[in-house]
Image: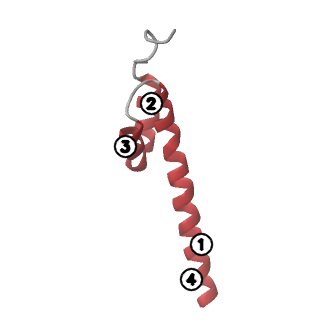
C-alpha cells in the first residue's frame, strides 16, 4: 500500500514538472515577440492550447525596432 502511494506521488510530481516545463514554450515565443512572458506563462498553465496558438499568431512587436 505504501509503495503504490509513493508511486502515485512521484507520478503527480513528474506530471507537474512536465506541465510547468511545457508552459515555458508559449511564454518564450511571446517574450521573443515583445509580449509579456509572465502573462503568457500564466495563460499557458491553464489554457496551453490557446496560449501556444496565440503566441505564434500575435504580431511581432520587435520586428521594426531591431537594427
The image shows residue 32 at horizontal and vertical percentages of: 49, 27
Mark 4 or mark 2: whose residue is earlier in sequence: 4
The disc label shown at residue 10, or none: 1
* Location of residue 3 by image quarter: bottom right
Could you classify mark 2 by the number of other residues whose Cα lies within 10 Å: few (under 14), some (14-19), or many (20 or more)? Answer: many
Helix, strand or loop at mark 4: helix
User: Real-space Cα distance between discs 4 and 3?
Assistant: 31 Å
User: Real-space Cα distance between discs 4 and 2?
Assistant: 39 Å
The foreground one among 51 and 21 is 21
Q: Mark 2 sits on what residue?
A: 30
Mark 1 or mark 3: whose residue is earlier in sequence: 1
Could you classify mark 4 by the number of other residues whose Cα lies within 10 Å: few (under 14), some (14-19), or many (20 or more)? Answer: few
Residue at left offset 59%, top offset 72%: 10
Compared with residue 38, is residue 5 higher up or lower down, i.e. above or below? below
Q: Mark 4 sits on what residue?
A: 5
The image shows residue 25 at horizontal and vertical percentages of: 53, 39
Could you classify mark 1 by the number of other residues whose Cα lies within 10 Å: few (under 14), some (14-19), or many (20 or more)? Answer: few
Q: Mark 1 touching mark 3, by CB under 8 A?
A: no
Residue at left offset 42%, top offset 49%: 45
The image shows residue 48 at horizontal and vertical percentages of: 44, 43
Residue at left offset 52%, top offset 8%: 67
Helix, strand or loop at mark 2: helix
Mark 4 or mark 3: whose residue is earlier in sequence: 4
The foreground one among 1 and 40 is 40
Helix, strand or loop at mark 1: helix
Q: Mark 3 sits on what residue?
A: 43
Mark 1 or mark 2: whose residue is earlier in sequence: 1
User: Real-space Cα distance between discs 1 and 4?
Assistant: 9 Å
User: Real-space Cα distance between discs 1 and 3?
Assistant: 26 Å
Amino acid at each position: 500500500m505504501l509503495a503504490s502511494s509513493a508511486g502515485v506521488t512521484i507520478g503527480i510530481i513528474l506530471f507537474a514538472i512536465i506541465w510547468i516545463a511545457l508552459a515555458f514554450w508559449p511564454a518564450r515565443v511571446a517574450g521573443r515577440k515583445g509580449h509579456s512572458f509572465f502573462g503568457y506563462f500564466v495563460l499557458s498553465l491553464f489554457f496551453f492550447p490557446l496560449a501556444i496558438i496565440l503566441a505564434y499568431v500575435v504580431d511581432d512587436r520587435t520586428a521594426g525596432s531591431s537594427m
